[in-house]
Image (tube, grey):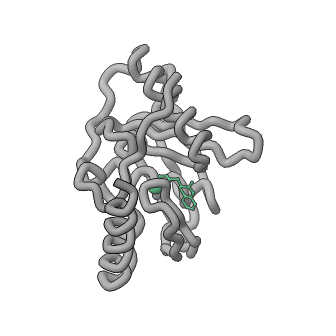
Amino acid sequence: MAILDILTYPDPRLYKVASPVDDVNGDIRRLVRDMAETMYDAPGIGLAATQVDVHKQVIVMDLSEDKSELRVFINPRILNSCGTQDYEEGCLSVPGVYDTVTRAEKVTVEALDEHGKPFTLEAEGLLAVCIQHEIDHLLGKVFVEYLSSLKQSRIKNKLKKRQRERV
Ligand code: GNR
Ligand code: NI
C-alpha cells in the first residue's frame, strides 16, 4: 500500500480527461487500494484517479464515519439525474476552500466495481454530490470552475502564493 501525492489546483494535470479502464486487473486493484489509503489518510470522503495524476476512470469514496463503506466506481456513467441541491463543497486538490455548488439532487450511476462487475446505484444527497464531484474530476473539471471568475482567480492566487511559500 502507498499514500499517493495529491495534485493541487490549478495544476494543469487536473484538467486532463481520464480514459476508460479496459481491463479491471491487479494493477487497477492496486491503484484502488492506494487511492483508498490516500483518501483515508487525507482525510476525504472521495478521491478521483485524476487527483493522483493517473488519468484513468477510477473513483473511490467512503461516506461512513469508520472507514467501513468503501465504494469503488470504475468507468462511471450517470444514466439519469433529477432535481437540484446546493451543497458547500470542498476538495482535497483545493485545500482550505469551501463554497456552495448547485448540482442534481438525485443521480443514477452505472459503473464497474473492483472486480469488473457492473452495478447500478441510485444516489441522493451527499452521495449524489460526491459522485458528481468525482466524475467531474475524471472529465478534467474542479468544483471551483462553478464559481465566479473573480472567486476562481482569488483561489488561484491564494493557492499559488501558498505553494511558493512552502518551497
Ligand atoms: O473530502 C471531500 N469532501 C467533499 C465535501 C463536499 C463535497 C465534495 C467533497 S469531495 C472531497 C474529496 C475530494 O476532493 N474528492 O475529489
Ligand atoms: Ni475533489
Task: Kindly identify the residue that appears in the image at 37 percent across and 63 percent down.
Answer: 165
Give the farthest residue toward the top: 26
Is residue 132 visible to us here? no
Q: Picture quarter containing residue 74? A: top left
x then y, percent, for residue 35? 49, 34
x then y, percent, for residue 102? 49, 74
20 or 110: nearer the viewer: 20
Task: Kindly identify the residue that appears in the image at 39 percent across and 18 percent down.
Answer: 27
97 or 142: nearer the viewer: 97
x then y, percent, for residue 83? 54, 71
Total marks shown come to 0
Task: Kindly identify the residue that appears in the image at 54 percent across and 67 percent down.
Answer: 89
Indicate the quadrant of ligand 1 in the picture: bottom right
Q: Picture quarter containing residue 11? A: bottom left
Is residue 15 visible to us here? yes
Task: Kindly identify the residue that appears in the image at 48 percent across and 61 percent down.
Answer: 95
Q: Picture quarter containing residue 88? A: bottom right
x then y, percent, for residue 36? 55, 34
Q: Quadrant of the C terminus?
A: bottom left
Q: Judge from the rendering whether residue 86 lies leftward or rightward of residue 59; answer left or right.
A: right
